[in-house]
Structure formats: structure tokens, C-alpha cells
Image (spheres, coloured by chain):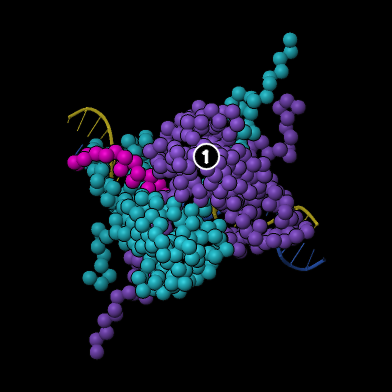
Chain colours: A purple, B cyan, C yellow, D blue
Amino acid sequence: MVNGDNKTSDRSNIAPVPTLRRLPRYLEYLKGLRVHGDAHVSCTQIAGALDLVPTQVRKDLACTGIVGKPKKGYPVFALMSSIENFLGWNDPRDAFLIGAGALGTAILGYESFRSNGLNIVAAFDTDTSKIGTKVRGVEVLALDKLEDLCRRMKILIGVLTMPAHYAQAVTDMLVRGGIKAIWNFTTARLVVPDEVVLENAQLASSFAVLSSKLRSTMHDPLEEESSEEVFVSN
Amino acid sequence: MVNGDNKTSDRSNIAPVPTLRRLPRYLEYLKGLRVHGDAHVSCTQIAGALDLVPTQVRKDLACTGIVGKPKKGYPVFALMSSIENFLGWNDPRDAFLIGAGALGTAILGYESFRSNGLNIVAAFDTDTSKIGTKVRGVEVLALDKLEDLCRRMKILIGVLTMPAHYAQAVTDMLVRGGIKAIWNFTTARLVVPDEVVLENAQLASSFAVLSSKLRSTMHDPLEEESSEEVFVSN
DNA sequence: TAGATTGTTAATCGATTAACAATC
DNA sequence: TAGATTGTTAATCGATTAACAATC
């Protein structure tokens, strides 16, 4: 059993980041199909709906370990399980959310995160008027209990939704409390030990892509009929 | 002037998406420097702080049109302007936000978006208890006024923070109202005409990357000291 | 001046896409 | 069976990284 070379367990469960980012889209699409029984779906179908090419979809899905049937495609439910399993979304992971403001409330309310393995068991804040209350059914605790509770409850994920200038201090508390991963919604650049996973939500990156596209369509006169009056000599 | 071949105006102001996504990080770093006068910054400095390689930073910055000085680097303020200008973040663009819930409130409160050219001038909702009130200083209006106001106020950007199942209907209203860009925070896959820019915030993608990394560190026994008891024969 | 840094060209790397045999 | 679809290998594409002359 030592050094087990089991073919079925994909030890090297690494996938390119672009693939990882597409997997939730596939899952969302599959959920939307609302099929039952042993319905199948092909890469052509998925690609068509999501504006991708079938080969890419096939390669992405292969990363999760699913095996399809030629001519039929993939069994829908098995495929959903395969994606969820690959992402670790089938077994919930306990998380703390720090910052019970508007953004924190929004994250707590995202039902799809809960169904995707993010189990936020408590929120933390420094605002005494919030401490002791519940937000979206989750209790808000005092920030000074964070490190101790993190350690005792073996919390895996910390979600940072507080003002950016507290972010590093809170991160340090979580790290001391033995956190495994940090999902950072602030603009702060965080320093964490190598063994802690850090993912930055980077809303500004998304807005930058939008801004740039918008700017080019606005500046490119060929994009649509010119907004300026065409001068016609009469 | 027709067909102007002006070298200074970079007509083909296209940059790779990965570059676009990094630009806000550079800007954030530069703002954090809090320098004054004609302070300069080098790619080596920026790369060191952001965990990138200098060549990549140099190429990214070159996309924005900035020209540096050998041995000195780039003038900090000119560089910030160059990035902001490239993204169109220097002149504010009027936007509507649809869905004045927790997420909408969070976006309205993100001061950095306002300073980055996103000028949300009104919010819309169907909840009559919210209509007429102000959220973060922005008035909440009835959804049925959306299309008409969008057209009359020549709104450029629509920010979607309402429940996913309304998203396509709201998008259609905005499109009819002449919107140029849509920033979608819902999980809905939206259909828009070619001339409308669509950017999906995709929080789930970010969470998928985190989940996958976390899953591999948890499953990889080499990542840290084994959590299982090592059996020692005595 | 010497040397750090830029701008740019070439090499590398990795993801996407195409091609095609295998298969149900 | 015929043909759509899979899995996989090869070709392409584009971003990253390396190399290096120019320069202040």
C-alpha cells in the first residue's frame, strides 16, 4: 500500500488555471439542463452553449477524470459529480468570514457558494453593534476571538471582506490559527506562508477588462455608425 | 486629418487580457508608494513587490504608451496617468446599478471603483420599500424607469447585482436603452448584441481556483508533515 | 565613465486548436 | 452498419521569459 500506484486516483490532480476557471461555467450549464435519468451531454452541446470549441471542453472535462462514451457524450449527473469532486465542492469546508459589512453580507447570501463547498460557520467584525447578531443566519463574533476559534474549530478557509487596511493583520491572525486558504476580496497585497493558499478575487481586474474593451469600442469609429453627424454637402 | 496617421495616438490600443488584468495591480502598488515630486520607479522594483519578472512588467507598461528613462525607470505620476488613461479610468463613465441588495450596496461602497471611472448615478430595484431611499448616497429608483432613463441619460455601463433569474430581462432593457457595456455579477449567461461589451465578474471562477489549490495541498502528503500518525515499530 | 535600466527582438513555454484513429 | 463523438497526438498560437544593444 505504501507508494501505491493506483491508476484510478489521479495523484497529479493539477489542471491549468484557465481550465479551473471554466469548470464552474460547465457546472452551471449542466445544472441548468435540469435533465433526469441517464441523460447524456456532448462537448459539442456544451461548447455551443458556452461559446467555446468542443476540443477545449473535452480536454477540460478530461482533467476532472470523467470518461465519456463515443457517440453519446457524458452522463450528465456523473459529469457534475466529477467536476464537483475535482474542485472539492462535494464535501463542505468550514470557513470564517471576516468583515460583516455589505460585501460580507453579499457573500453570506450567495447560496451557490454554500452549495459549492464553502461552509461559512461564523462571521467576525469589530463593530460592537453587529457582534452577537446574525447576518443571513450566521452569527457575528468579536474579532479578538478569531485566532483561538480558528485553531479550535480547525477552520480551513478565511474569507476577507473587511476594509483593506486591516487585511494583513487579520491574515496574520488566521495564519497563526492554522488557516489553510485565504480568499481575499480586498485590494491589499497579502503576505502568507508558502503552505497557505492565497486567492485574490480581484474585482478591479474584471473592471479593467471591461473598461479597456469599452474604451476601444468608444474610440474605434468603425465599431458602429459614427456618433458624429456625417457632413453632407447640399 | 482624415485617416490621420498620428503616431502619438495608439490606434490599436489593444492589450492581452492577462496584461489588462495586471494593470490595476500596478496602479494599486504605485498609489501605495505615496511618493511626491518627480520620483521614479523601475520595473525591477515593481516586479519585486508584485512577485513578477521585470520583463513582463516592462512589456505590460509599454502597452499603456509610457516611455521610461534608462537607469531611472518611469516617473511615478506619469505612469499612473498612463495606466489610468489606457483603461479609460481618468474620465468617469456614468453607470446604473441594478439590484440594491447586499452585493449592490457593496459595489456602491467600493470607493476605488468610483475613483476608477465608474460613476454610478442611480440604483434600481423592484422592492418598493427601497425605492425612493438612498443607498451609499445613491438614489434607488423603480425598475420600470430603467430603460427610459438609460436612454435619456446616455448611460454607458450597467452593473448587474440582482438575482440571476432577472438578469437577462434587465439586460434586454439596458440594451434597448442603448447601454454600451454590462458588468455582470450574477451567474446568468447573458446574451447581448455584438456591439455591447459584456464582462462577467465570475466570483465562482476565483473560488474554483482556490478550491483546487486547497484540495491538492490537502491531498498531497508531501506538502507538509503528514497529519496521520507515523507508525514506528518499537 | 560605469552600470543599471530601458526597449526590442528572439527563444521558450504552455494553452488552444486541429487532425484523426478508435469506438459504440 | 454508418456516423457522431470520444481520447489523444500533433500543429498552432500567443503569452512569458531570456538575451542584448542602446542609453542616460
Q: Is residue A200 in view from this perspective?
A: no
Q: Is residue A234 in view from this perspective?
A: yes
Q: Give the residue drawn at x 36%, y 62%.
A: B121
Which of the two residues, C1 or B137, is positioned nearer the viewer here? Answer: B137
The residues colored magenta run B18-39
Left or right of A121? Residue B100 is left
Q: Give the residue drawn at x 67%, y 62%.
A: A33
Task: Look at the picture and state if B76 lies above or below B190.
Answer: above
Q: Is residue B63 magenta?
A: no
Quadrant assignment, res A232: bottom left
Q: Give the residue drawn at x 51%, y 60%.
A: B162
Q: Please, which residue is most extreme toward the top here?
A: B234
- Tell me which chain the residue with mark 1 is part of: A
Task: Look at the picture and state if B33 lies above or below D13.
Answer: above
Left or right of D21? Residue B176 is right
Q: Give the residue drawn at x 60%, y 31%.
A: A153
SS at mark 1?
A: loop
Q: Where is residue B145 in the image (x, y as percent from the top left)?
A: 43, 72
Give the dominant element type of the magenta stretch: helix, strand or loop.
helix
Quadrant assignment, res A154: top right
Task: Look at the picture and state if B44 lies above or below A116.
Answer: above
Q: Position of residue A228 (x, y in %)?
A: 29, 75
**Amino acid carrying mark 1 in the image:** Gly
Q: Where is residue C2 in the image (x, y as percent from the top left)?
A: 22, 27
Location of the N terminus of chain B by quadrant is bottom left
Location of the C terminus of chain B by quadrant is top right
**What is the number of callouts on the image?**
1
Q: Is residue B21 magenta?
A: yes
Left or right of A49? Residue A6 is right
What residue is disc 1 on? A132
Q: Where is residue B226 in the image (x, y as percent from the top left)?
A: 64, 24
Which of the two residues, C2 or B3, is positioned nearer the viewer here? Answer: B3
